[in-house]
Image (cartoon, coloured by chain):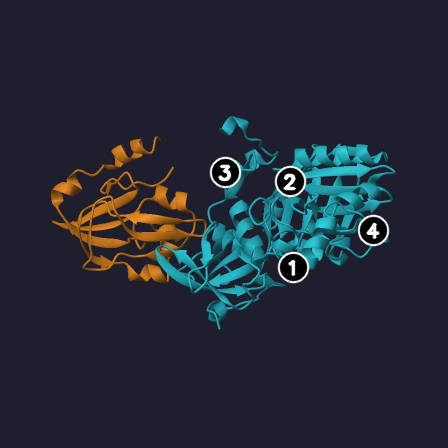
Amino acid sequence: MSETLQRTALYPWHLAHEARMSPFAGWEMPLHYGSQLREHEAVRQAAGLFDVSHMRPLDLRGPGARTLLRRALANDVARLDAEPGRALYTCMLQGDAGILDDLIVYYLGDEQYRIVLNAAGAQKDTAYLESLAQEQGGEVDFRPRDDWGILACQGPAAVAQVASVLALPELSALKTFRSLTPRAGLFVARTGYTGEDGVEILAAHDELIEIADALIAAGVVPAGLAARDSLRLEAGLNLYGQDMTTVDSPDRSHLGWTVDLRDRERDFIGRTAIEAERAAGPAHRLWGLLLPRDAIPRHGYEAVTAAGQSVGAVTSGSFSPSLGLGIALARLDAVVGLDSEVFLQVRQRSVPARVVEPPFWRHGQAVYSAEESQPQ
Amino acid sequence: MSELPAQLRYSKTHEWVAQLAPGHFRVGITDHAQELLGDVVFVELPQAGQEVEAEAACGVIESVKAASDLYSPLSGKIVASNTELADNPQWLNEKPYDQGWIFEIEAADGDFAKLLDAEAYQQSLGA
């Protein structure tokens, strides 16, 4: 199995830092470097460094680029027109509003965009966008940036550390969801997947190793995919393939806010289905669940009402290191309201869970406390 | 390379067993097991007085990543469990052979003698 897995340029670096490696979406990635909890805490309190080079940058440019993305993406890249460097988070939908993938798109300049795709879908997404571009007829040049990898430095101290290591004092003033291209071959964005302040750095593979070494020397802690998963879940951020798939629409995935319907002329793929779903009301929603720390919810656990009726299932669940509770995202029937209770079967006992709005952690603070883990 | 104290006996389900006195044993999980589990956040302990069967589940170890059954390597009666793990689950990761012990059991010395020694356990790991 391992011979088929891809490795990032930092693979030897991970081994040198005693990473425990694990397969993820076709890549051999660091799961942790000794302790997921310590890495999680480092990101919440100071700064952690993730190799996320399994995610794939794709540059699009040419006279048809803006039109293509306004058709392919549910959020509207026209929002970015006034400000090169600005980014937005969006879903790419099927005609039935099922989510093909989620991604961040950066506006680099007139008819120039950079998107970062999930590892599992990168090739398929690229082929799909190319086919849409052909259908459309406008000229778009696609350049997958296989020459680049990605580091994410995340945590309250991350921006200052990266500004120092890259000698980029202007980074401190960069707003969230903005990016800089300080020179050819280096791209720095104030984005991430942890619910903390931080940056993502795109550069050539060899250069990334040097940057990683410098950040670690400055005190940043290497962090693996395990911590990334508990951090993103606390931050209420969906994982594609788990919390959303091609059978889930954005409204069913707590992502209705990423769908931009304001320009009535914009006929993006999935629009008709979203409008129909909104007219009828979605059948399911993705909510958060809070459980006591001795009842940790796991992916696939069924949620039932007090009367024993099945109302959905956990899509992602974990112990929350920052809250000291069990937390989950769960896709639930629309009849289940916020602050109501559902019951999960945890190790042969039925445990009440409080239904809450994600996230669980925001702006450096817990949104919910242990006392709130029980239904009112 | 994980740590394997030579004076202990081991099971294929990754528990270690120490003989405290004839017929009286202490049980925990091996260094290898804690590495596989990842950070432990909760332990459901067997209760004193409980009768357990060898190779049957008698508790649960929850890590951030997953819930795993805890097995008893011996048949017998639980006589103590490490209640300090409730507040210090990380001891299973940090000190699996010391503060991270899980329960004590009264069992037959003959059953203890049939468990793996460190070398045989090492081989069972394929290392």
Please check whether the numbered discs 4 and 3 fall on a single chain. Answer: yes
Decide: few, some or many residues near mark 4? Use Cα within 10 Å; few <14, some 14-19, many ≥20.
few
Instruction: Name chain B's colour.
Output: orange
Q: Which residue is mark 2?
A: A55
Where is residue A91 shown, x and y percent of the image? 69, 48
Upstream in sequence: badge 1 or badge 2: 2
Relative to A178, A99 lies left or right = left
Where is residue A60 shown, x and y percent of the image? 79, 38
Q: Which residue is mark 1?
A: A281
Q: Is residue A310 above or below residue A93?
A: below
Helix, strand or loop under label 4: helix
Amino acid type for the residue under numbered disc 3: Met
Instruction: Write down which chain is painted cyan.
Output: A
CA gap, disc 2 and disc 3: 17 Å
Decide: few, some or many residues near mark 2? Use Cα within 10 Å; few <14, some 14-19, many ≥20.
many
Where is residue A261 shown, x and y percent of the image? 77, 55
Q: Please tell me in which quadrant of the rendered image residue A345 appears.
A: bottom left
CA gap, disc 1 and disc 4: 27 Å
Which residue is drawn at the image coordinates 34% and 55% (left, top)?
A348
CA gap, disc 1 and disc 2: 34 Å
Callout in the foreground (1, 4): 1
Q: Which residue is mark 4?
A: A78
Helix, strand or loop under label 1: loop
Callout in the foreground (1, 2): 1
